Image (spheres, rainbow, N blue to C red):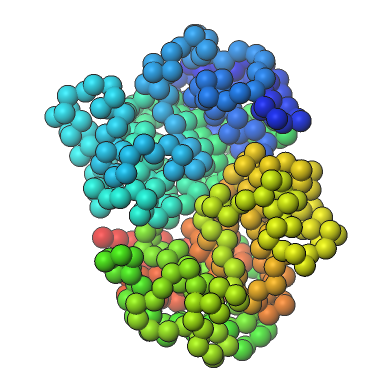
């Protein structure tokens, strides 16, 4: 049993209390979902349960956290790590090895299990999670989604009593999400206790027992599964939550009026070292297009986008912008990429400084306006690394919106965003296209794909297949194609 009794917490350097008088009991074998807007305190609760607070986080804590009626502060960290397994929001922060097999077996080796038992468990887990193809790979050459799968599998290998997962589906494709759902159900059958902080909610309908809604560090409501998934659409939106069911989305009419060709990929091929990533890919994009790019984890979506904007070289073919040959310097000048891991492109000493250092032409009013739109104005003096994952994502997007580029490439821009933030990002992307920009959107977020994109491309290793919307959402066709292309 997990019990948080009247817990408050304030991070060192923070001017606000991040968790306020929070009380929650989680029974053995329960699956509990934490939901709410970005920055509401979900991750803080997960850190209290897995011991990062207070062991590795300096801050001011009040109240009591107990595991099986024992004060968590009295449990040695090495024992706690055997009881609680964690999957963090950024999976790279929990890797200790360079290759996947070493990472997967790391926890069991530290526990001193016999080699034959470790090998047996490795085969069992990689087969059950359908990740045998990720065995013996360099972790840092994996895609974001593949890294997330390895992080989940590493924790599952150790077989703890309690699983704590923070945004576990942020970069997973639909089939990987289905696999995770099956694993969560299997964990429940084994009597495991599960705590999940998540924005994507529909896949958990058959998994969670109760749902904790949080707001500004406070526990506002506890719902049963039935109560939560029967919330009206208007109530769900008022709470700032993503869709609860995979319903057909209402999409406004054609917003895209410009027909001039902006980008052409002409029979291009891309390699990563000696490994061929994509072969003989061709594509035409027009001004005003919002093009969703999807496909299985690791197929090469991010590599394609890095190539379009000049951060990766071609091995064959060429790219034209406005029908003129666009070599790397031109592509770098005319396009902007918001990376999947935004930590790679945040360098300022404050949120406000981040906006200024990336754009010397933006006025103070323009910066203030965009920070208000992205709900970051109150954090303008805060260091970017002190923000939550969703807030960092919004900051990187805010910086991009201040720039005047012809081509924008967003790589998983809503991976850590709540409903309100997703809607803000969606409206700002639409505003870019009204000015003639072309937007490429790499995403596994089917809610965003269904409600924003006027074109949807499914990426295979040797071709791009355009998906045309009919009475079904794009997501219905994407799932079918993932199944057809599954190895």
Horizontal side of 33 relative to 79 (left or right) equals right
Quadrant hosting residue 13: top right
In this view, 343 is above or below 74:
below
In this view, 444 is above or below 197:
below
In this view, 226 is above or below 299:
above
Quadrant hosting residue 437: bottom right
Q: Position of residue 322 (x, y in %)?
A: 58, 88
Q: Count the marks: how many?
A: 0
* Residue at x-position 65% and y-position 74%: 405
Q: Position of residue 116 (x, y in %)?
A: 14, 29
* Residue at x-position 54% and y-position 52%: 344
Q: Position of residue 191 (x, y in %)?
A: 37, 24
Screen quadrant of the C terminus: bottom left
* Residue at x-position 56% and y-position 20%: 54
Quadrant hosting residue 387: top right
Nearer to the camera, 81 or 355: 355
Q: Please say whether residue 335 is visible from this viewpoint.
A: yes
Nearer to the camera, 361 or 79: 361
* Residue at x-position 72% and y-position 41%: 382
């Amino acid at each position: 049993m997990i019990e948080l009794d009247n817990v408050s917490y304030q991070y060192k350097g923070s001017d606000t209390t991040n968790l306020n008088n929070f009380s929650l009991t989680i029974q053995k074998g329960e699956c509990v979902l934490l939901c709410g807007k970005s920055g509401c305190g979900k991750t803080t609760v997960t850190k209290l349960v897995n011991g990062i607070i207070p062991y590795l986080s300096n801050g001011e804590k009040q109240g009591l956290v107990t595991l099986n009626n024992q004060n968590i502060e009295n449990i040695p960290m090495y024992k706690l790590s055997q009881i609680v397994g964690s999957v963090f929001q950024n999976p790279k922060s929990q890797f200790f090895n360079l290759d996947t097999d070493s990472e997967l077996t790391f926890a069991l080796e530290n526990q001193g299990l016999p080699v034959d038992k470790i090998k047996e468990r490795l085969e069992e887990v990689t087969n059950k999670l359908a990740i045998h193809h990720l065995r013996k790979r360099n972790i840092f050459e994996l895609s974001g989604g593949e890294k997330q799968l390895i992080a989940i599998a590493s924790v599952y290998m150790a077989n703890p009593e309690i699983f704590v997962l923070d945004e576990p589906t942020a970069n997973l494709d639909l089939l990987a999400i289905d696999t995770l759902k099956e694993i969560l159900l299997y964990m429940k059958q084994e009597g495991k206790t599960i705590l999940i902080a998540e924005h994507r909610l529909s896949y958990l309908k058959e998994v969670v027992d109760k749902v904790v809604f949080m707001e500004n560090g406070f526990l506002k409501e506890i719902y049963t599964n039935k109560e939560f998934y029967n919330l009206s659409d208007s109530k769900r939106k008022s709470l700032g939550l993503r869709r609860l069911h995979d319903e057909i989305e209402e999409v406004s009419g054609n917003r895209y009026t410009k027909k001039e060709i902006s980008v052409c990929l002409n029979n291009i091929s891309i390699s990563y070292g000696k490994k061929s990533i994509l072969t003989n890919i061709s594509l035409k994009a027009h001004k005003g297009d919002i093009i969703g790019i999807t496909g299985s984890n690791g197929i090469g979506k991010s590599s394609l986008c890095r190539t379009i904007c000049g951060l990766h070289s071609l091995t064959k073919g060429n790219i034209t912008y406005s029908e003129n040959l666009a070599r790397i310097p031109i592509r770098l000048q005319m396009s902007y990429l918001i990376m999947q891991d935004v930590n790679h492109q945040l360098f300022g000493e404050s949120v406000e400084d981040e906006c200024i250092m990336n754009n010397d032409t933006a006025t103070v009013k323009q910066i203030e306006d965009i920070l208000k739109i992205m709900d970051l104005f109150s954090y303008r003096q805060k260091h970017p690394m002190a923000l939550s994952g969703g807030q960092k994502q919004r900051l990187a997007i805010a910086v991009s919106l201040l720039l005047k580029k012809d081509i924008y490439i967003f790589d998983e821009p809503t991976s850590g965003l709540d409903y309100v933030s997703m809607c803000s990002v969606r409206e700002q992307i639409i505003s870019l296209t009204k000015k003639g920009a072309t937007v490429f959107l790499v995403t596994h977020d089917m809610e965003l794909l269904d409600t924003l994109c006027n074109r949807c491309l499914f990426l295979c290793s040797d071709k791009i297949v355009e998906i045309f919307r009919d009475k079904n959402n794009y997501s219905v066709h994407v799932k079918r194609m993932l199944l057809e292309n599954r190895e």
